[in-house]
Amino acid sequence: MADTPRALRIMLVDDHATVRHGLKLMIDAEPDMAVIAEAGDGASAVHLAGESKPDVIVMDISMPGMNGLAATQAIRKADARAVIVTLTRHGDAAYLQELLRAGVSGYVLKRSAPTELLQAIRAAAAGGQYIDSTLVPRITAGLMKGDRGGSKRPSGGLTDREADVLRLIASGYSNKEIAVRLTLSVKTVEAHKANAMRKLDLSGRIDIVKYAVLQGWLDPA
């Protein structure tokens, strides 16, 4: 009998105890996740991260004393392999850019559906990146302005179906929604996505959006 995969060890960082409690209940209800540590401020988060070595840290930005950005920078400086997902009410591009520069693997808004955070945790733990789906159009718009006139990246030998799947992912569709639109199974969509990302050496949704912009897939009609 195969061994049961170890649950992802999650650390929560938020200065509101009620928020941490709600997140803990949600995360602990998932069979592949468990909250193993909690911190109410950035300084405590830095100490606990080194002590508990979680698989993923879910980090708020706005906290008294050392804020989430400073804590993220300190944790990543101490351990470049630390995996951090930002959970915040701030949807401003400036916050997103600063946190991505600091090395976070995910950026999720508190007002979004709970599934966004769970997807971000799983994607980050797997070595990928995840940006809240509501922010994708804003990222796309920014990339369109910044990348106009640049050379397009080689297609990498994508099949038509692989290109279709990447185009829809970049537009914010989930695997299940793509499966319905293309009349495919979810597993087939996942296979096309994996093959396309391997061919193009893409590591996550951010890279997919950048690629789509460079190909002109997301240009407004």
Image (tube, helix red, strand yellow):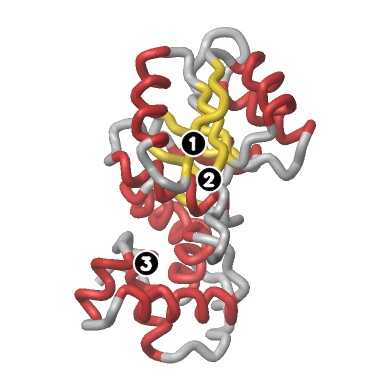
Residue 205 makes an appearance in the image: yes
x 58%, y 83%: residue: 154
Which residue is at the front of the view, 16 or 162?
16
Task: Point out residue 175 in the picture as x, y percentages from the top left corner.
Answer: 32, 67
x 54%, y 41%: residue: 97
Residue under label 2, please give it: 7
Q: Badge 1, how many Cα within 10 Å: few under 14, some, many 20+?
A: some
Q: Point out the residue furthest to the right here.
A: 78
Q: Viewed as shown, does residue 220 lie left or right of 63?
A: left
Name the element at disc 1. Answer: strand
**Label 3 vs 1, first from the N-terminus:** 1
Residue under label 3, please give it: 169
Residue 21 vertical placement versus 177 (above, below): above
Task: Point out residue 72 in the picture as x, y percentages from the top left corner.
Answer: 64, 30
Residue at mark 2 to residue at mark 3: CA–CA distance: 27 Å
Q: Amino acid at mark 3?
A: Ile
Residue under label 1, please give it: 34
Residue 89 makes an appearance in the image: no
Q: Quadrant of residue 191?
A: bottom left
Which residue is at the front of the view, 85 or 91?
85
Name the element at disc 3. Answer: helix
2 and 1 marks in contact (CB < 8 Å): yes
Residue at mark 3 to residue at mark 1: CA–CA distance: 28 Å
